[in-house]
Amino acid sequence: MTNKTLTRADLLHAVYVTGPGLSRVEAKQIVEIAIDEVCSALETGETVKLRSFGTFHVRSKRPRVGRNPKTGKEYPITARRVLTFKPSPRLIASVNGEEFTGKDGDDDEADTPSHQPVPARRAADL
């Protein structure tokens, strides 16, 4: 196991290498558009579901009173929105070095039936 962090540059390189005929500039645009689209959807409170990867949710938390565990002093915690991530069963199996069988209720494939096309967003629509 390595301690390397996957960076935006690594993603750019992966897109560049796997996309024959793509220039580095085009690969960078693809990565940037994908990341910007995910970010803008989360900013508006939408759920982002990436098949075989996981689901990002934005949750609203109410204001509450927190305590410093060392001193016991109370502090107000303001209302805020937090980002949560739930990995797909396929990703969990992969991280654990197991083969995914699909019997765990892989709901990321059940939500998008193969007989209904998913509308794609064009770069011009962004």
Image (cartoon, grey):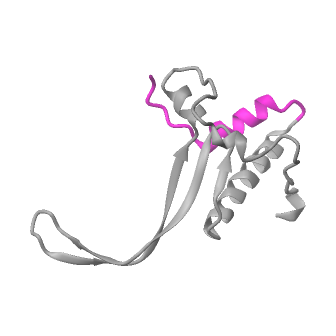
Q: Quadrant of residue 105?
A: top right
- Residue nearest the observer in this picture, 60 or 107: 107
| Residue under the point 65% across and 70% down | 44
- Residue nearest the observer in this picture, 119 or 125: 119
| Residue under the point 23% across and 77% down | 75
Where, quadrant-wise, is the N terminus in this rendering? Answer: top left
Where, quadrant-wise, is the C terminus in this rendering? Answer: bottom right
The answer to whether residue 16 is left or right of residue 107 is right
Is 86 above or below relative to 43? above
Stretch of the chain drawn in magenta: 1-21
Residue 25 belongs to magenta span: no
Q: Where is residue 79? Give x, y as percent.
A: 41, 77
Is 61 above or below relative to 26? below
List the single residue furthest toward the left: 71
The answer to whether residue 65 is left or right of residue 19 is left
Q: Quadrant of residue 89?
A: top right
- Residue nearest the observer in this picture, 29 or 67: 67
Is 90 above or below relative to 65? above
Q: Where is residue 20? Give x, y as percent.
A: 87, 30
Q: Where is residue 7? Give x, y as percent.
A: 58, 41
Residue 13 belongs to magenta span: yes
Q: Quadrant of residue 100?
A: top right
Q: Where is residue 32? Give x, y as percent.
A: 72, 52
Is 86 above or below relative to 41? above
| Residue under the point 70% across and 35% down | 13
